[in-house]
Image (cartoon, rainbow, N blue to C red):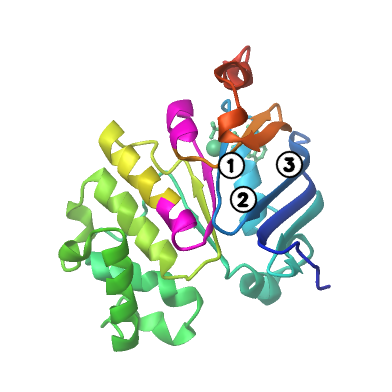
Amino acid sequence: MRTTLAPGVKLAVHDLTMRYANGHTALRNLNLSVRAGEIVVVLGANGSGKSTFMKCVVGLNRPTAGSVEVAGRNLAALSGEALRQARLPLALISQNANLVKRRSVLANVCCGALGRHRTLATAFGRLPREAIEPAQAYLDEVGLLHLARQRAGTLSGGQAQRVAVARALAQRPHVLLADEPVASLDPEAADEVMRLLRRLATDDGLAVVCVLHQPELAMRYAHRLVGLRRSQLEFDRPASEVSSQQIANLYVGEAS
Ligand SMILES: Nc1ncnc2c1ncn2[C@@H]1O[C@H](COP(=O)(O)OP(=O)(O)OP(=O)(O)O)[C@@H](O)[C@H]1O
Ligand SMILES: [Mg+2]
């Protein structure tokens, strides 16, 4: 069934609930929408449901109830090839860059286009010419074109994560999801990756959703902050309107 999103909204989640097979409800009636040009940071204690939310959005988890609307389709109602097609506007990056270490940086970025072009399935053999130019442009976008021929296994953590962003961009997503993308980075590299994610929203018009465990980075780079606590939405408001006390409350009594 086709759905209609409000103008500018790229991702809309309605009453999203996820109960795992062991009976644990990791998300309860979550409502959230993200617009083009906006970076939304999701904060919450360990186990509050952040990754569950991201996995529901990209279709790695099948929600128990609710909908995930992207480009006019409800992903929660789809499976198989229909789901694969409908999630093409989404790209996910995670804590580990997960690059193929023995291949070049450029080959790794070319790989991001595989979902769109089955004919690029040889991307890990010889690089197809039609994939190279765009991949170089994405590497340029993340400031690493000069490393295109370097083996991915030789990169620093910050560089690897920026290559992962370039690989995600090769999917030409409308929505970029990042689950703790700076978890293993030093403060300077973390800043650089967050600056990049913010710029992709403001300059390139992507809708960006980013999970962080660093409130100070969240305050600095997010347009909007979403707080999750015990599987539920605690707040969803402009970053400038969220107090440090509200953020601190997300973590009180949650240590396990
Ligand atoms: N496949 C699963 N089966 C059962 N329970 C799960 C499964 N995956 C996650 N959970 C549980 O759901 C809850 C939320 O997990 P989730 O990974 O979404 O948390 P999180 O907010 O991402 O935490 P963290 O900050 O540690 O990454 C946790 O209690 C977790 O144990
Ligand atoms: Mg997580």
**Amino acid at dot 3:** Tyr
Which element is circle 3 on? Answer: loop
Which element is circle 2 on? Answer: helix
**Amino acid at dot 1:** Ser
Q: Residue, x 50% and y 74% (percent of image)? A: 115
Q: Counting residues from the N terminus, which is met first, the one under dot 3 or under dot 1?
A: 3
**Could one spot residue 256 in this view of the protein?**
no
Image quarter (top left, top right, bottom left or bottom right) of the C terminus: top right
Hey, which residue is sitting farthest front in the picture?
240
Residue behind label 2 places its C-beta within 8 angstroms of ligand 1: yes
Occupied quadrant, residue 37: bottom right
| Above-or-below relation of 235 to 11 | above
Give me the C-alpha separation between circle 2 and circle 1: 6 Å
Q: Which residue is mark 1?
A: 51
Answer whether labels 2 and 1 touch (C-beta < 8 Å).
yes
Q: On the picture, is 223 further left or further right than 119?
A: right
**Amino acid at dot 2:** Lys
Q: Which residue is mark 2?
A: 55
Hey, which residue is sitting farthest top in the picture?
253
Instruction: Give the magenta range.
Output: 199-220
Residue behind label 3 places its C-beta within 8 angstroms of ligand 1: yes
Residue behind label 1 places its C-beta within 8 angstroms of ligand 2: yes
> Residue 69, image x and y in percent?
73, 61
Q: Which residue is mark 3?
A: 20
Image quarter (top left, top right, bottom left or bottom right) of the N terminus: bottom right
Give me the C-alpha separation between circle 2 and circle 3: 12 Å
Q: Is 205 included in the stretch rendered in magenta? A: yes
